[in-house]
Image (cartoon, rainbow, N blue to C red):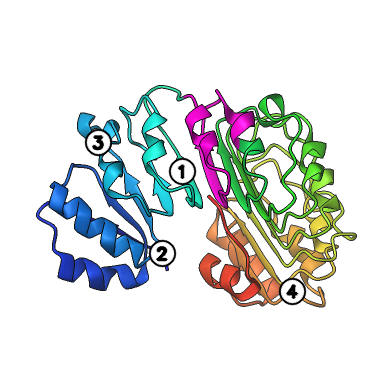
Amino acid sequence: MSRIVDVSSPLDMQQLRVRLDDASVVQFSQPLAEAEYRLLAALLAEHPTVTLRAYGFDEDLATLRFLRWFPRLRRFSVAHLHNLTDLAPLHQLSADVELLDIGETRKPLNLTPAAAFRDLRQLRIVAHRGGLPELIDANPNLQGLSLWRLPVDQYLPLIALPHLQSLALTLGSLAHGEWLLQVPTLRYVALRAVRKLTDLDPVTRLPALQWLCLDALTADRLPDFSSCTTLLRADCTAMRHLRHTTSLQGLAAAPQLRELSVTEALLPADAFKPFVDHPTLEHVSVGLGTERRSCEAEQLLRRTPPRSDTDFAVRYGLLRVL
């Protein structure tokens, strides 16, 4: 279930009802009529796993007045609702909200009103800092957390999230990788363009880690994953500081690795030699900047491509957060 469905006035309820069967998000950028809000709210009540998203530059949407028609909504996003200035209208939502995405806005928001929710399961925050610790502390049952453009260990030096399975850090910074070890329950970790993070050794000490995504970090060599007995998949994208034939050797030591993707890389094909006789590796995707190097690595490994992200997540019961 991954399709995004755009809606606008006049609302075609019959068509929308069909499209919602495999949708993950319903979104709009212009106000609907009051009757249409009522109809959409009733339909979403029948599809509690679908997220409602308001986005764009409309001033009326930015007031969040429309939320009065959605008292039973479980999943809500304001990513790119650029003129939003106040989260107080979130009080119109049910206390049972399970997913909240406070994404990109023109000005930083105070997150304190969102701390009224006490049972969130998924949370995404982009750059908003005020009230962030209180919001995290108010929701100890979080299972998925995504933080963008934040100095993570500066604003959240200590976290207590005993049920957190999935964590994505994008842009922003993390000065001390040991910060991750506060959450030993993590099964999925994505680290994307995180500044200051040069030592990835703490990642290898996450006892439940199954899927690791590394993107545009400055590490020039991956650590020894021989003790990471649960790791099944690793995705490395735009890791351009990995250039040596031994840069991936530590990852090849992961004893249960099943799937590997290394793309937008500057590695020599010989860097994949440690994976040739890996006992569990089944699927590999390689992109090394030139067709010649990529073909050399593929011929060396002779594995089929990895499953899609969605298929892999479903197969192993993983929550993938962006």
> Label 3's element?
helix
Question: Within 10 Å of the Cα at label 3, are there few (<14), some (14-19), or many (20+) other Cα atoms?
Answer: many
Residue appearing at x 73%, y 63% in the figure: 210
- Of badges 1 and 2, nearer the viewer stands 1
Q: Which residue is mark 1?
A: 101
Q: Which amino acid type is shown beneath numbered disc 4?
A: Leu
Q: Earlier in the sequence, mark 1 or mark 3?
A: 3
Residue 239, x across and y down, in percent: 65, 45
Relative to 270, does residue 162 appear above or below in the rendering? Answer: above
Q: Which residue is mark 4?
A: 281
Alpha carbon separation for disc pair 2 and 3: 24 Å
Residue 68, x across and y down, in percent: 29, 43
Residue 269, x across and y down, in percent: 70, 60
Residue appearing at x 74%, y 63% in the figure: 272
Q: Which residue is mark 3?
A: 61
Alpha carbon separation for disc pair 1 and 2: 16 Å
Question: Within 10 Å of the Cα at label 4, are there few (<14), some (14-19), or many (20+) other Cα atoms?
Answer: many
Q: Which amino acid type is shown beneath numbered disc 1?
A: Asp
Res 2 label: 2
Alpha carbon separation for disc pair 1 and 4: 35 Å
Q: Start and end of the magenta stretch?
A: 110-135
- Of badges 2 and 3, nearer the viewer stands 3
Relative to 163, does residue 47 appear above or below in the rendering? Answer: below
